[in-house]
Amino acid sequence: MNILEFTGLVFSGSLMAGFLGSLTGMGGGVVIVPLLTLLFGVDIRYAIGASLVSVIATSSGAAAAYVREGFSNIRIGMFLEMATTQGALLGAIIASLIPTPFIAVLFGMVLIYSAYLSSRTPSSDSNNGAHDPLAARLHMDGTYPGSHGPVSYYVQAVPTGFSLMFLAGALSGVLGIGSGSVKVLAMDRAMHIPFKVSTTTSNFMIGVTAAASAGVYLNRGYIDPGLAMPVMLGVLIGSLLGARVLVGARTRWLRLTFAAVILVLGVEMIFNGITGKL
Amino acid sequence: MSYPQPWNDQQMDRIIGMILRVGVLISALVVLTGGFFYLRHYGFNVPEYGIFQGEPADLRNISGILQDTLAFRARGIIQFGLLLLIATPVVRVSFSIIGFALQRDKAYVMVTLIVLALLLFSITGGGR
């Protein structure tokens, strides 16, 4: 196989990943590393570098659309980005000290967890806990466009959310993924931010988080232009196409199928990590 | 709010959305251009990604990437596009500082400055 054929295949695979990722709302970044390592035999360090770049592209592309709709909360996003960028920097720095089989196993575990999360329906629990006075002082409480005009919401448990965001950033830095599922978990479950606000704000934050670790990876020589080019363009075009397809009744079926694929990839990553093939 | 707001959050959202869109579009076009020349030069070589070697020094830092781009090296042009992509969130964060400053929101100017400092630390090779 020459570079021309390799580039074409990687582009097609990334296009598919981006398309399914945006259609199911799970993000395509999470399958790029297993795709490159398991299918194309790429070293996991190059794969993580290319994945990070594609994560920035899709996040920025999608966030551009979301911020205009008025769902994402830039204050919550910016405040929590302090945690995610610190985590991402730390994660990227320690990544070079972790043996690659461990990274493969950790990656597999995160894949299995994402598959589990996506097979459940999102929670929309009532906002009955104590309002965090810190959130009020930081002007985090806001409104989002509902069907009968703006709906206001109050943010809870800011310190818990902040800590979870540090973890999300660290995972993103070690594995080269967006960690969207952990971010949504922190905002939706811990801070009780409405689901639509959580997902769009999370998407908005992913680009900044990934940029913080991408700088470290670039300086360390993990980002190869020949590999990152088809991955970035493929995932970006795929996710833009996915966002344009009308979301119909088959989304749940698609989500479950994609979750099953992610589950298999997760098991495969762990197996290959333990047997020392990655 | 007692003071007049020169910029509200909606206007900030709109400008941020535009920065992100333009940044991604420009970087994708630069990567595409570099990719075209890369495939024309190296298309029939054999890819070697199975063994990790790391990138050459010139593709690892901003000044090296700029030199390669000006010398019209294909891999350098792609890397320049990727650098623009990494810079897009940095520009977005920098703009937010101006936005929060115009709203006289000192707490968020501080928050955003911290995020920007972490990003600049990373992109200039501080975490290597």
Image (cartoon, rainbow, N blue to C red):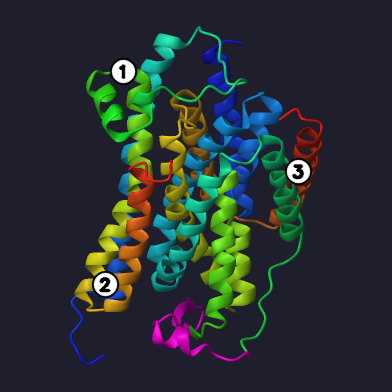
At x 59%, y 40%, the residue is A97
User: Which of the chains bears the disc numbered 2?
Assistant: B
At x 65%, y 56%, the residue is A248
The N terminus of chain A, quarter of image: top right
Q: Does A28 sit above or below residue A162?
A: above
Residue at the disc numbered 3: A266
Relative to A221, A251 lies left or right: right
Relative to A51, B10 lies left or right: left
At x 48%, y 90%, the residue is A133
Residue at the disc numbered 2: B100
Distance CA(mark 2)–CA(mark 1): 40 Å
Magenta residues, start to end: A128-151
Q: Secondary structure at mark 1?
A: loop
To the question of a shared chain for discs 3 and 2, the answer is no
| Residue A224: image tag | none
Q: Secondary structure at mark 3?
A: helix
Q: Position of residue A66 (x, y in %)?
A: 44, 61
**Identity, as a three-letter code, of the amino acid under mark 2:** Phe
Residue A139 included in the magenta stretch of the image: yes
